[in-house]
Structure formats: structure tokens, C-alpha cells
């Protein structure tokens, strides 16, 4: 119980620190005076000071910080500096399902690819299959998602759109509730693109773990007792090797849901958290940047906490540490 | 309308433009007029990378939405909503005729048209007009203090907007349906400023705050049905609209106009090629120009803009507080090299003057070209070196601040190498596109040379010269100081005031005077004109009747859909 409370406390502390850093960096950047940007080009000093006052930029920094947090968390009516009147909390609420759809769908694919690749490579170690899978894995890891995404778009939306890929819908997002078929069709290539990178990583990690496990004493004992290689791999080695993969998965999922799938979302025109973060950074829209960063931090911190909790359940030594 | 420059970033690839030159379909008008009916209907799909901010016409200052307001909001006056040169004419809109102006130029009387309704069904009255002008101050409209401050009572409104009445400034007489504006001084641009979207007439009960994403009822052929900055802006036909003037309020053709947000410029081009979208607000990326100009030549429209890309030289700190050093830069810049870096001659032409060609007040002269003449032919580096020698500034360090996209950075690198060649120690500072414009305005940042642009608000010489160079536009230590050179010349300020007065009685003589002022500024050299850009519009193959207004660019609601 104390462990849980400690984790929650440190999570809050991390989020508080991040929000302060974002806030200070924003206002310390030269050329960023939000009043000048809001007032429009060539605004006279009177208009500028009216805008400054209306948005509370004439108040001291700590007051501004408290007001922003109050609007974000208590009254939940914080609005964008760029698209005036556009409330930040509903923006996050609308973007979250898009990111969740993208990340969860991709996760299923990369788990299948990653585990399948890792197991296959270990099973056929010594044959030509192993290096082939590993080379594919390293290639997948090395290709940046935005590049793969652009190439996929070039092929499916442009070069072969009139022939092979005429069934591919335009870029964008269709909510699941509106049309499940179109939802999946719109997300198919984003899923594959995102899954490629993570599938490659997972295959390589799992193979390394499995190869180590296959050299352990308990495997040798199993072999000595006459267990088949298949049974050793599936029932014994794989179980032990999965725990690092599980913790990796937890962390990846946390950061991706928090918006780390930014480039995939931008390339495929998906209005998720990553796209929102990207746009707000492009526009220097502090309220949205703040909300996105805190949202992302929450998921990263939460994922870390959950992974730690799971560790504590599995391994009592962690609890004492 | 500076925000459009954000989109003009990635225009390079000179090779592709040789092809483009061949197809530069000079703002062709497929057909004029056209009675409604035959071409009416359909949904026009526009696409833009991101939304243009608040939808409130009294606050928004982006070309992106000004273009759409043409089919939505009306003021007492407007720029004619037609293609070609006639689009520079101011015509009566909600007013029955052009105003009666008193002989001293301080009183403008308008007759309001009867029977016009807002999209919410309410009739437009003189009260709505008065309330709209009060609201302009209450919502801190960007130019409330720089354009509309000539109205009597504006001073009080700028000080305490909440209690703004404009008493004695905007006077309505409901019995005769007239509105009278009283000005503190004559202003030759007052009519132009009344024709801007800021001066749109909105229902009197519109809230006195920036309405942001909440649409305000319109008077034009369309109303805004919904707006979500992360998704789309939807315009639908206003059933209360009946055209009262073909020039000011033409009937729109599509039944619905959608602008969706979120695709990259790259994906926008593809979407138009596939017929998934009909037009993109953003400039097509450079690597797609050859493709669209060869395969889709008939869908590509190139038009010169009344805009200027220039270097601001900070006249308050070394080395450019020295006039000779400033002139040296004007002599040394190879404008054809800069044009090439921007994308070639089909996307820009070299500039010698502050006022763009075909702009009111523009005079043909070119003070800084080798071998003289009225057009720029070549740089004179020897002359520049000689001037720098005389100025005694050689060897000083110069920071060049540019935006960090490929085109701006390319030009920046050229400038650095040129400055080094001239004997300075130059460094390049590339800043994010969002920060650079405000950064270079603030004297606190000690910027010596910066690359930037200016796009016209309305066709009047003062919109370049007074805005960019008058003493009143210079505000030290502020991010909002549009006179980037920090140049203040009271003599030339007085000449501009004189040209203003002349504009009230004799516009031709006034324009000649503005040409002289341009020349005077160029000899002082606070800024270095580089080139005048052109605009590329890429439309889908189901679109026709493309028309280009010099004021608001492509006439969106005049497009026909197949």
C-alpha cells in the first residue's frame, strides 16, 4: 500500500515539475510574446495592452501558472491561444480515441510480428531463417516511421492509387461508432507502419532473451530429462523470456498512447494526441502544449508505475528496495 | 495577411519550374458572369494544413479566412468580388451607394440598403452597423488602434473598450436609414478600411468578446454551419440571402463549402490529384511542382502577388546605422540568385522598389542595379565594397536572422556568404517560423539583418510605406513593432502626411508623390527589396470558372463543380 502511495506521489511530483518547465521555457523564449501574436500584426500599443490585460499576461508568472492550472484541471475551460474559444480539454478527449485506435491496433500486429519473429528465429537458429528474420528486424527498426509512412502514401495514394490500391480510402480518420469497417480500413496502413518499427524491436529483444534462456541450467536439465526441443522452447524458455518483453511493452504503450506516435499521425492525417501536440508546437499554442505534455507525462508515468507494480508482484525484492 | 507566407515556405526546385513557366495560365477566367442555375450545386472540398484561428471576422487577420469571408460577411463597402483588375475597386455593399463625403473629408454618410437579412432571419438595421463598430473596439480588433482610430470617440474606446460608445463618431438615423461617420481628421484610406473584413456588419446582439470558434450570423450567400479547428469548417447556403449586387454580393455556386484541416501539404496535393479535395490553401511543396505543372497543367494557376520579400536592416545599431553600409547591401544583392533560391522566375520576379509593380503609387525605378535603368539587371559588388570601405564598417560582425525552412535558410546562407565576401563576419541564425517574425521586430533582440515579407492589406501605397517605415510603426522593445528596420525619418513622415492629404482631392498626384517617397526611402536604404512572389493555386479536375481577385485571391464561391 505504501508502495502504491509512494508511486502516486512521485508521479504527481514529476507532472508538476514538467508543467513548470514547459511554462517557463515558453515564457522565456524571445519572440514569443503571446499578446503580440494574439493581437495581430501591426497592432497599436493600446490594442496590445488591452489584449495583454484580457488574457492576464500582465500578471506575475506564478499567478499566471496557477490560473492556467486552475482552468485546465478545476474549471476545465482552458482555451487555445490560437484557435480562440476552442477548449483544450474536449480537444484532448476527442483526440484520445484516435490515438488509442491507432496504438492498440498496431500493438496487436507488432506483438504477433515480434513474438512470431523472435520464436521463429530462435527455433531455426543456425539455419538461414534466423539471420533473415534478424536482418528484416533491424531494417524495420532503422526505417523512420515518417519515411515509411510517406512511402506507403506515395504508393497507395498516388502511384498505384488508380490500380492496385484503388480500395484505399483518403487519409484521415473515421470513428469506430460511425462505421467500423471504414475505421479499420482508414487505420490499416497506419497500423502496419507503426507496427513495423516495434515488431522489429520486439523480435530482436525476444530472440536475445530466448537464446540466453536456452543456455540456462534449467533448460539443460529439461533436455537431460528428455523433453523435446519444442516443449523446452514453448513451455520453459519462452515463459522466462517474456517478462522483459512485457515491461518493454508497458512502457512503449504508455508513451505511444501519450502521443509518441506523433509522426505516424501527422503523415497519415490522423487527428490524435500526437497530431495535436505537433500542431500546438507549430503554433506555439501554450495551453494545448501544456495539456498535451501533461497528458503524455501522465501515461508515461502511469505505465512506469504499473510496470513497477507488476515487478513488485512478481519479485518481492523490488518491494524492499 | 502575412500569415500566408507561412505556407509559402517550401518553394524551391528550380528545374520543375521551367515546366511551370510553360503552363502559367495567367489567372484565366474560364467564363465570365454566368447566370446561376446551370452551374449551381455540389460540395466544394477545400483542404488546409491547419485552421486559421478564430472565426470572428472582426478579429481574424489571416488570408485563409478573409478569402472565405467573401462569401459570408458584408460591410458597408467591399472590394468588388470579381476576377481581374476590377477587384481593386471599392464598391457599395450593404450601403446603397458610395458615401457622401463632406468637403473637409471628415464626414462620411451612408444609406443602408433595406430588406437585407442575417442568416438568423433578423433584418439588418442601422443599429447593427453602430454596434459592429463599437464591437470592433470591444474585441480589440488588430487594427482598431491603427486604422479605425480616426473615428471620433475612438480614443476613449481604445482606453476603456468595455464602455465604448463612439458617441458622435458613428451616428445612426433609423428614420432615414443613414449612418454617418465623423472622423477626427480626413483619411484617404477610410473607405478601403471600411471594405476590410474587420468592418463587417454583425448582429447588434453579438457578444462583445472574440467569439472564437462560435460562428456569428452572416449576411452573404453562405453561413458558417460548424467550426472545429482540428477537423473542419463547414459553410452552407444562407437561405435568407438574395443577391443585391452582382459586384458586391454575387450568388455563390456550390451548395456547400468545406475546409478540412490536418493533411500535410504533400498529402493535400495527392488528395487533389485523386479528386478527394478540390483546392489546397497551402502552397504545393517544391518536389511536387514539376508533377502538377506537367500532368495537371490545366489545373494549375499562377498569379503575381502585390507582395514583397525584403531584408530589414536595423538602422539603430552597427553596422547598418551607417547609410553607406546599408546602400552597399542594396548594391551587392544578386536578386536573380535570390529568385532562383525561391523557385525561379515563374514564382518570383526581382524587386527594386518597396511598392510592388502594378500597385498604386509604384514608380518604375531601380537605384541599385549595375549600368542603371529602371529594371534590375545585375549586382555591383565593387561599388558595394567601395561603399563599405568608406563607411568604415568592414570587419564588423553581422547576424542574419531567417526562418528555418529550406527556402528561407537557402537565402540566408547566400546572404552570409555575400556578407563575408563584402568583408563582414556574418553568421546565420535560423529561427522557427513561428518565432522569427515577432523576434526580429523586438529591438531588445538586437537583430542586425532579417529576411521577411509583407503582403498587402488593401491596395494603397501607405499600406507598405507607412506601415513598414513610419516613425509611428516603431515601438522599441516590443514584439509588435512592424517597422523592422527601426527607421524613423520625420521629414519623410511629413511627406507621407502630405501625400495623404493630396489623396483626398487628387489621387493621381498623390500616387506620384508616393512614388517619390518610395524613391526617397530607397536612397536611405533601411530595407532591401528582394523580389515580388507569385501564387500557385492547384485545383481538382472537377472545378472550373477559376477567377482571381487581387484583393482576396481565388474567388472560392464562384467555382463551378462538375
Image (cartoon, coloured by chain):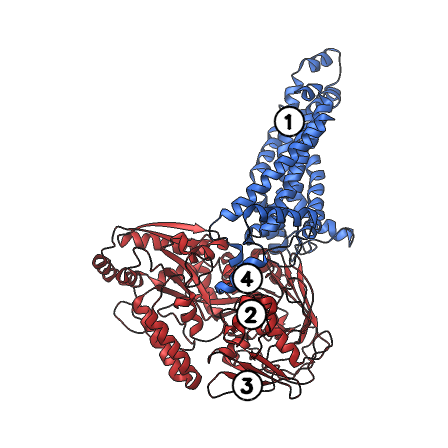
Chain colours: A blue, B red
As measured in the structure, the alpha-carbon distance from the residue carrying label 4 to the one carrying label 3 is 32 Å
Q: Are marks 1 and 2 on the same chain?
A: no
Question: Within 10 angstroms of label 4, few (less than 14), some, or many (20 or more) residues?
Answer: many
Q: Residue at x 68, y 64 (%)?
A: B214
| Residue labelled with disc 4 | A50
As measured in the structure, the alpha-carbon distance from the residue carrying label 1 to the one carrying label 2 is 73 Å
Q: Which of the two residues, B445 or A289, is positioned nearer the viewer here? A: B445
Q: Are marks 3 and 1 in contact (CB under 8 Å)?
A: no
Residue A249 in sight: no
| Residue labelled with disc 1 | A207
* Chain on which label 2 sits: B
Which-is-in-front pick, marks 3 and 1?
Answer: 3
Q: Which of the two residues, B558 or A149, is positioned nearer the viewer here? A: B558
* Chain on which label 4 sits: A
Marker disc for residue B450:
none
Q: Position of residue B253 (x, y in %)?
A: 66, 76
In the image, B234: left or right of A151?
right
Mark 2 secondary-structure assignment: helix
Question: Within 10 angstroms of label 1, few (less than 14), some, or many (20 or more) residues?
Answer: many
As measured in the structure, the alpha-carbon distance from the residue carrying label 4 to the one carrying label 2 is 11 Å
Of labels 1 and 4, earlier in sequence is 4
| Residue labelled with disc 3 | B99
Which-is-in-front pick, marks 1 and 4?
Answer: 4
Amino acid at each position: 500500500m505504501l508502495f502504491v502511495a509512494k508511486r502516486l506521489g512521485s508521479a504527481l511530483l514529476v507532472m508538476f515539475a514538467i508543467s513548470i518547465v514547459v511554462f517557463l521555457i515558453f515564457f522565456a523564449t524571445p519572440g514569443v510574446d503571446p499578446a503580440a501574436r494574439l493581437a495581430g500584426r501591426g497592432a497599436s500599443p493600446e490594442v496590445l495592452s488591452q489584449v495583454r490585460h484580457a488574457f492576464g499576461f500582465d500578471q506575475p508568472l506564478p499567478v499566471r501558472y496557477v490560473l492556467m492550472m486552475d482552468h485546465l484541471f478545476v474549471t476545465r475551460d482552458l482555451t487555445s491561444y490560437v484557435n480562440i474559444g476552442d477548449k483544450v480539454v474536449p480537444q484532448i478527449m476527442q483526440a484520445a480515441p484516435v490515438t488509442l485506435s491507432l496504438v492498440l491496433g498496431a500493438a496487436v500486429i507488432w506483438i504477433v510480428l515480434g513474438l512470431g519473429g523472435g520464436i521463429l528465429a530462435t527455433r531455426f537458429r543456425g539455419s538461414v531463417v534466423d539471420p533473415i528474420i534478424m536482418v528484416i528486424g533491424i531494417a524495420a527498426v532503422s526505417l523512420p516511421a515518417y519515411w515509411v509512412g510517406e512511402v506507403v502514401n506515395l504508393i497507395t495514394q498516388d502511384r498505384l492509387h488508380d490500380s492496385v490500391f484503388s480500395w484505399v480510402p483518403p487519409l484521415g480518420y473515421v470513428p469506430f461508432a460511425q462505421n467500423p469497417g471504414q475505421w479499420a480500413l482508414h487505420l490499416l496502413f497506419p497500423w502496419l507502419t507503426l507496427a513495423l518499427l516495434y515488431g522489429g524491436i520486439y523480435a530482436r529483444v525476444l530472440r536475445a532473451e530466448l537464446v540466453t534462456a536456452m543456455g540456462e541450467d534449467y533448460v539443460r536439465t529439461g533436455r537431460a530429462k528428455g523433453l523435446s526441443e519444442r516443449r523446452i522452447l514453448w513451455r520453459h524458455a519462452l515463459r522466462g523470456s517474456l517478462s522483459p518483453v512485457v515491461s518493454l511493452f508497458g512502457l512503449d504503450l504508455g508513451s505511444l498512447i501519450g502521443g509518441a506516435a506523433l509522426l505516424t499521425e501527422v503523415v497519415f492525417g490522423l487527428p490524435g494526441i500526437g497530431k495535436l501536440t505537433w500542431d500546438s508546437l507549430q503554433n506555439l499554442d501554450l495551453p494545448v502544449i501544456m495539456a498535451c505534455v501533461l497528458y503524455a507525462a501522465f501515461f508515461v508515468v502511469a505505465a512506469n508505475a504499473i510496470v513497477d507494480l507488476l515487478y513488485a508482484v512478481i519479485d518481492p525484492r523490488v518491494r524492499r528496495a | 495577411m502575412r500569415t500566408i507566407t507561412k505556407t509559402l515556405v517550401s518553394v524551391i526546385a528550380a528545374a520543375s519550374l521551367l515546366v511551370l513557366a510553360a503552363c502559367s495560365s495567367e489567372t484565366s477566367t474560364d467564363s465570365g458572369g454566368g447566370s446561376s442555375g446551370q452551374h449551381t450545386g455540389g460540395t466544394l472540398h477545400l483542404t488546409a494544413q491547419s485552421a486559421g484561428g478564430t472565426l470572428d471576422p472582426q478579429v481574424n487577420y489571416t488570408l485563409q479566412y478573409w478569402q472565405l469571408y467573401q462569401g459570408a460577411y458584408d460591410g458597408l463597402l467591399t472590394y468588388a468580388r470579381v476576377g481581374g483588375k476590377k477587384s481593386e475597386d471599392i464598391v457599395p455593399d450593404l450601403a446603397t451607394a458610395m458615401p457622401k463625403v463632406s468637403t473637409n473629408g471628415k464626414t462620411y454618410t451612408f444609406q443602408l440598403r433595406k430588406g437585407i437579412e442575417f442568416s438568423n432571419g433578423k433584418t439588418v438595421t442601422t443599429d447593427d452597423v453602430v454596434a459592429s463598430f463599437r464591437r470592433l473596439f470591444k474585441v480589440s480588433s488588430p487594427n482598431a488602434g491603427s486604422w479605425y482610430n480616426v473615428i471620433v470617440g475612438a480614443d476613449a474606446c481604445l482606453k476603456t473598450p468595455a464602455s465604448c460608445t463612439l458617441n458622435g463618431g458613428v451616428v445612426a438615423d433609423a428614420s432615414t436609414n443613414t449612418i454617418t461617420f465623423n472622423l477626427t481628421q480626413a483619411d484617404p484610406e477610410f473607405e478601403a478600411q471600411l471594405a476590410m473584413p474587420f468592418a463587417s456588419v454583425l448582429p447588434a446582439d453579438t457578444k462583445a468578446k472574440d467569439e472564437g470558434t462560435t460562428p456569428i450570423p452572416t449576411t452573404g450567400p453562405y453561413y458558417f454551419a460548424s467550426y472545429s479547428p482540428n477537423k473542419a469548417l463547414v459553410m452552407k447556403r444562407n437561405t435568407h440571402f438574395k443577391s443585391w449586387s452582382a459586384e458586391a454580393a454575387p450568388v455563390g455556386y456550390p451548395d456547400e463549402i468545406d475546409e478540412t484541416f490536418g493533411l500535410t501539404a504533400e498529402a493535400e496535393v495527392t488528395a487533389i490529384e485523386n479528386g478527394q479535395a478540390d483546392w489546397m490553401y497551402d502552397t504545393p511543396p517544391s518536389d511536387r511542382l514539376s508533377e502538377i505543372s506537367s500532368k495537371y497543367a490545366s489545373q494549375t494557376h499562377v498569379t503575381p502577388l502585390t507582395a514583397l520579400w525584403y531584408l530589414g536592416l536595423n538602422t539603430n545599431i552597427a553596422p547598418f546605422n551607417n547609410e553607406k553600409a546599408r546602400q552597399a547591401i542594396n548594391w551587392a544583392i544578386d536578386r536573380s540568385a535570390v529568385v532562383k533560391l525561391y523557385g525561379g522566375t515563374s514564382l518570383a520576379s526581382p524587386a527594386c522598389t518597396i511598392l510592388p509593380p502594378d500597385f498604386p503609387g509604384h514608380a518604375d525605378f531601380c537605384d541599385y542595379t549595375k549600368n542603371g535603368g529602371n529594371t534590375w539587371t545585375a549586382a555591383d559588388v565593387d561599388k558595394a565594397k567601395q561603399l563599405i570601405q568608406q563607411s568604415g564598417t568592414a570587419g564588423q560582425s553581422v547576424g542574419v536572422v531567417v526562418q528555418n525552412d529550406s527556402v528561407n535558410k537557402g537565402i540566408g546562407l547566400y546572404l552570409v556568404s555575400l556578407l563575408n565576401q563584402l568583408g563582414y563576419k556574418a553568421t546565420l541564425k535560423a529561427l522557427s517560423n513561428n518565432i522569427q517574425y515577432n523576434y526580429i521586430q523586438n529591438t531588445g533582440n538586437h537583430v542586425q539583418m532579417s529576411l521577411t515579407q509583407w503582403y498587402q492589406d488593401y491596395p494603397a501605397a501607405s499600406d507598405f510605406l507607412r506601415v513598414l517605415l513610419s516613425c509611428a510603426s516603431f515601438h522599441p522593445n516590443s514584439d509588435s513593432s512592424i517597422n523592422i528596420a527601426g527607421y524613423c525619418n520625420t521629414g519623410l513622415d511629413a511627406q507621407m502626411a502630405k501625400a495623404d492629404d493630396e489623396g483626398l482631392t487628387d489621387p493621381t498626384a498623390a500616387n506620384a508623390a508616393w512614388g517619390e517617397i518610395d524613391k526617397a526611402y530607397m536612397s536611405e536604404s533601411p530595407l532591401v527589396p528582394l523580389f515580388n512572389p507569385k501564387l500557385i493555386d492547384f485545383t481538382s479536375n472537377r472545378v472550373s470558372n477559376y477567377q482571381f481577385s487581387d484583393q482576396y485571391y481565388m474567388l472560392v464561391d464562384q467555382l463551378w463543380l462538375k
